[in-house]
Image (tube, grey):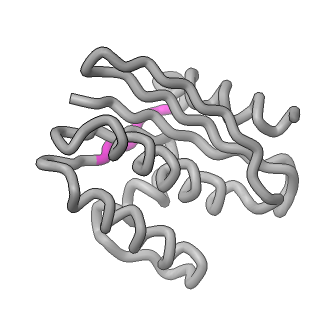
Amino acid sequence: MIELYVDGASAGNPGKSGIGIYIKGEGHALKISEPIDPTNNHTAEFLALLRGMEEAAKLTTGIVSARSDSKIVVTAVENQFVKNELHKGYLAQVLKIAETFDYFFIKWIPDSENRAADELARQAIQR
C-alpha cells in the first residue's frame, strides 16, 4: 500500500503558493516540494492532491491511501462533488486517476499528522 500525504500552502489569498507531497510504502519514500503559480489555499490543496495522485500512479496500480488536512478536498473527493468551477476540473482529474488503482481512499487527518507534507509545501513557498 502507498500512503500519500499532501498539503498545499499559500501566503496570501491569492499569494505565493506551493505544494508538498510525501509518499511512503512499498519500498518508496518520496518527498516533493514544488512552487506553483500564485493562488489561494484551497486551490493549492487540490493541486497538491492531483500532483500526488500523478506520482502515486507512477509507483503502483494497487492500494493508495491519500491523507490531507483539507476538509474541503477530502469531502469533495468522498462526495465526488465540489461547487467551485475551477476545482471541478481538478476533482475530475483526481477521480480519473483514482479509478486506475485497485483500491483508493482518502482520509482527513489533523495538521499534527501531516507535518511532512506541510513542511514541504512551506519550503516551496520560500523558493
Q: Considering only vertical position in the picture, is 29 above or below 22? A: above
Front one among 31 and 40 = 31
- Which residue shows up at 29% across the image and 61% down it? 78
Residue 99 position in % (x across, y down): 21, 61
Q: How many marks?
A: 0
Q: Which of the 4 image quarters holds residue 82?
A: bottom left
Our reading of the magenta stretch's main secondary structure is strand
Residue 116 position in % (x across, y down): 56, 22
Residue 36 position in % (x across, y down): 75, 52
- Which residue shows up at 44% across the image and 42% down it? 55
Residue furthest to the front in view is 58
Q: Which of the 4 image quarters holds residue 68?
A: top left
Front one among 66 and 98 = 98
Left or right: where 66 falls relative to 123: left
In magenta stretch: residue 107: yes
Left or right: where 64 falls relative to 120: left
Q: Considering only vertical position in the picture, is 85 above or below 48? A: below
Q: Quadrant of the C terminus?
A: top right
Residue 49 position in % (x across, y down): 48, 50
Q: Considering only vertical position in the picture, is 103 above or below 120? A: below
Left or right: where 6 falls relative to 77: right
Q: Considering only vertical position in the picture, is 26 above or below 126? A: above
- Which residue shows up at 27% across the image and 57% down it? 98
- Which residue shows up at 87% across the image and 33% down it? 126
Q: Quadrant of the N terminus?
A: top left
Q: Which residues are magenta?
A: 106-110
